[in-house]
Image (cartoon, helix red, strand yellow):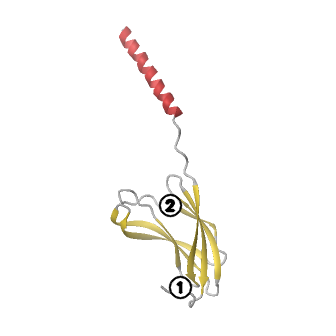
Protein backbone atom coordinates (compact mmCIF):
# COMPACT_ATOMS: atom_id res chain seq x y z
CA UNK A 1 0.00 0.00 0.00
CA UNK A 2 2.82 2.35 0.93
CA UNK A 3 4.58 1.72 -2.42
CA UNK A 4 1.45 2.55 -4.43
CA UNK A 5 0.94 5.74 -2.42
CA UNK A 6 4.57 6.81 -2.97
CA UNK A 7 4.25 6.12 -6.73
CA UNK A 8 1.04 8.14 -6.90
CA UNK A 9 2.70 11.08 -5.09
CA UNK A 10 5.71 10.91 -7.41
CA UNK A 11 3.41 10.86 -10.44
CA UNK A 12 1.56 13.94 -9.16
CA UNK A 13 4.86 15.79 -8.55
CA UNK A 14 6.14 14.90 -12.01
CA UNK A 15 2.83 15.92 -13.62
CA UNK A 16 2.85 19.26 -11.78
CA UNK A 17 6.42 20.01 -12.90
CA UNK A 18 5.45 19.38 -16.55
CA UNK A 19 2.49 21.72 -16.14
CA UNK A 20 4.71 24.44 -14.72
CA UNK A 21 7.17 24.11 -17.61
CA UNK A 22 4.35 24.22 -20.15
CA UNK A 23 2.84 27.30 -18.52
CA UNK A 24 6.20 29.11 -18.63
CA UNK A 25 6.91 28.26 -22.27
CA UNK A 26 6.73 31.39 -24.45
CA UNK A 27 3.78 31.61 -26.78
CA UNK A 28 4.50 32.04 -30.49
CA UNK A 29 4.24 35.67 -31.61
CA UNK A 30 0.95 36.78 -33.11
CA UNK A 31 1.38 37.34 -36.86
CA UNK A 32 1.81 41.00 -37.64
CA UNK A 33 0.08 43.17 -40.12
CA UNK A 34 2.17 43.97 -43.18
CA UNK A 35 1.70 46.79 -45.67
CA UNK A 36 2.42 46.41 -49.38
CA UNK A 37 2.43 49.29 -51.85
CA UNK A 38 2.04 48.57 -55.57
CA UNK A 39 1.42 50.40 -58.84
CA UNK A 40 -0.70 49.06 -61.70
CA UNK A 41 -1.08 50.39 -65.26
CA UNK A 42 -4.65 50.50 -66.59
CA UNK A 43 -6.69 51.75 -69.54
CA UNK A 44 -9.79 53.84 -68.99
CA UNK A 45 -13.09 51.89 -69.23
CA UNK A 46 -11.30 48.49 -69.17
CA UNK A 47 -11.18 45.83 -66.46
CA UNK A 48 -7.61 45.56 -65.14
CA UNK A 49 -6.49 42.81 -62.77
CA UNK A 50 -5.02 44.33 -59.61
CA UNK A 51 -4.75 41.23 -57.43
CA UNK A 52 -4.87 37.42 -57.31
CA UNK A 53 -5.55 35.80 -53.94
CA UNK A 54 -5.23 32.08 -53.27
CA UNK A 55 -3.98 29.66 -50.62
CA UNK A 56 -1.82 26.70 -51.67
CA UNK A 57 -0.96 24.21 -48.92
CA UNK A 58 2.33 22.24 -48.86
CA UNK A 59 0.53 19.17 -50.26
CA UNK A 60 -0.49 21.25 -53.34
CA UNK A 61 -4.17 21.44 -52.37
CA UNK A 62 -6.15 24.58 -51.66
CA UNK A 63 -6.51 25.99 -48.19
CA UNK A 64 -9.20 28.44 -47.07
CA UNK A 65 -9.30 31.57 -49.20
CA UNK A 66 -8.54 34.90 -47.54
CA UNK A 67 -11.11 37.52 -46.61
CA UNK A 68 -10.82 40.69 -48.71
CA UNK A 69 -12.15 44.07 -47.57
CA UNK A 70 -12.07 47.40 -49.41
CA UNK A 71 -10.68 49.75 -46.75
CA UNK A 72 -10.58 52.88 -48.89
CA UNK A 73 -12.30 52.83 -52.29
CA UNK A 74 -10.81 54.50 -55.37
CA UNK A 75 -12.02 58.05 -56.03
CA UNK A 76 -12.77 57.57 -59.73
CA UNK A 77 -13.04 53.87 -60.57
CA UNK A 78 -14.64 50.75 -59.14
CA UNK A 79 -13.19 47.58 -57.64
CA UNK A 80 -14.78 44.15 -58.12
CA UNK A 81 -13.65 40.78 -56.73
CA UNK A 82 -14.60 37.63 -58.65
CA UNK A 83 -14.21 33.92 -57.96
CA UNK A 84 -11.91 32.02 -60.30
CA UNK A 85 -9.79 28.90 -60.74
CA UNK A 86 -6.04 29.46 -60.73
CA UNK A 87 -3.86 27.07 -62.70
CA UNK A 88 -0.11 26.96 -62.20
CA UNK A 89 2.87 24.81 -63.06
CA UNK A 90 6.14 24.60 -61.16
CA UNK A 91 4.79 26.60 -58.20
CA UNK A 92 7.02 25.86 -55.18
CA UNK A 93 7.02 22.03 -54.86
CA UNK A 94 3.85 21.66 -56.95
CA UNK A 95 4.48 20.62 -60.53
CA UNK A 96 0.88 21.35 -61.59
CA UNK A 97 -2.12 22.58 -59.65
CA UNK A 98 -5.57 24.05 -60.04
CA UNK A 99 -7.07 25.79 -57.02
CA UNK A 100 -9.90 28.23 -56.31
CA UNK A 101 -8.92 31.89 -56.08
CA UNK A 102 -10.22 35.42 -55.87
CA UNK A 103 -9.28 37.94 -58.56
CA UNK A 104 -9.61 41.70 -57.95
CA UNK A 105 -10.31 44.01 -60.90
CA UNK A 106 -10.26 47.80 -61.23
CA UNK A 107 -12.23 49.74 -63.86
CA UNK A 108 -11.97 53.50 -64.43
CA UNK A 109 -14.73 55.51 -66.15
CA UNK A 110 -14.16 56.27 -69.87
CA UNK A 111 -13.34 59.95 -69.31
CA UNK A 112 -10.87 59.46 -66.43
CA UNK A 113 -7.11 59.79 -66.96
CA UNK A 114 -4.56 60.01 -64.14
CA UNK A 115 -3.78 58.28 -60.86
CA UNK A 116 -6.35 56.59 -58.65
CA UNK A 117 -5.65 54.93 -55.30
CA UNK A 118 -7.33 52.27 -53.19
CA UNK A 119 -6.56 50.16 -50.14
CA UNK A 120 -7.44 46.48 -49.65
CA UNK A 121 -7.22 44.47 -46.43
CA UNK A 122 -6.47 40.79 -47.03
CA UNK A 123 -6.88 38.50 -43.99
CA UNK A 124 -5.47 34.98 -44.21
CA UNK A 125 -6.25 32.04 -41.94
CA UNK A 126 -3.97 32.03 -38.93
CA UNK A 127 -4.25 35.76 -38.30
CA UNK A 128 -1.88 37.18 -40.93
CA UNK A 129 -3.21 40.45 -42.36
CA UNK A 130 -1.86 42.29 -45.38
CA UNK A 131 -2.78 45.90 -46.18
CA UNK A 132 -2.39 46.54 -49.91
CA UNK A 133 -2.11 50.16 -51.01
CA UNK A 134 -2.58 50.11 -54.77
CA UNK A 135 -2.03 53.09 -57.07
CA UNK A 136 -3.65 52.67 -60.49
CA UNK A 137 -2.18 54.78 -63.29
CA UNK A 138 -4.98 55.20 -65.82
CA UNK A 139 -4.09 56.29 -69.33
CA UNK A 140 -5.79 56.62 -72.69
CA UNK A 141 -5.65 53.93 -75.37
CA UNK A 142 -2.54 55.32 -77.08
CA UNK A 143 -0.41 55.77 -73.95
CA UNK A 144 0.14 52.13 -72.95
CA UNK A 145 3.60 50.64 -72.76
CA UNK A 146 4.48 48.49 -75.78
CA UNK A 147 5.49 44.92 -74.98
Give the labeled residue for mark 1.
145
- Tell me where residue 74 sits by quadrant: bottom right
Q: Quadrant of the N terminus?
A: top left
Q: Residue at x 50, y 52 (%)?
A: 126
Residue 78 horizontal/vertical position (percent) = 60, 76
Residue 26 horizontal/vertical position (percent) = 53, 38
Query: Camera-side residue: 61 or 33?
Result: 33
Query: Camera-side residue: 82 or 120?
Result: 120
Q: Earlier in the sequence, mark 1 or mark 2?
A: 2
Q: Is residue 54 left or right of residue 32?
A: left
Q: Residues within 10 Å of mark 2 (few under 14, many from 20)?
A: some
Q: Residue at x 55, y 73 (%)?
A: 80
Q: Residue at x 61, y 73 (%)?
A: 135
Give the labeled residue for mark 2.
66
- Tag shown at residue 110: none
- Tell me where residue 93 sits by quadrant: bottom left
Residue 47 horizontal/vertical position (percent) = 53, 80
Q: Residue lying furthest left in this view?
A: 95
Q: Residues within 10 Å of mark 1 (few under 14, many from 20)?
A: few
SS for tag 2?
loop
Amino acid sequence: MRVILLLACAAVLIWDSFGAVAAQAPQPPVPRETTVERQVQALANRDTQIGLYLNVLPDCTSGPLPTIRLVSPPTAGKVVVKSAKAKATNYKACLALEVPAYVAFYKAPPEFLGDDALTLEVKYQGGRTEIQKITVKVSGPGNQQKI
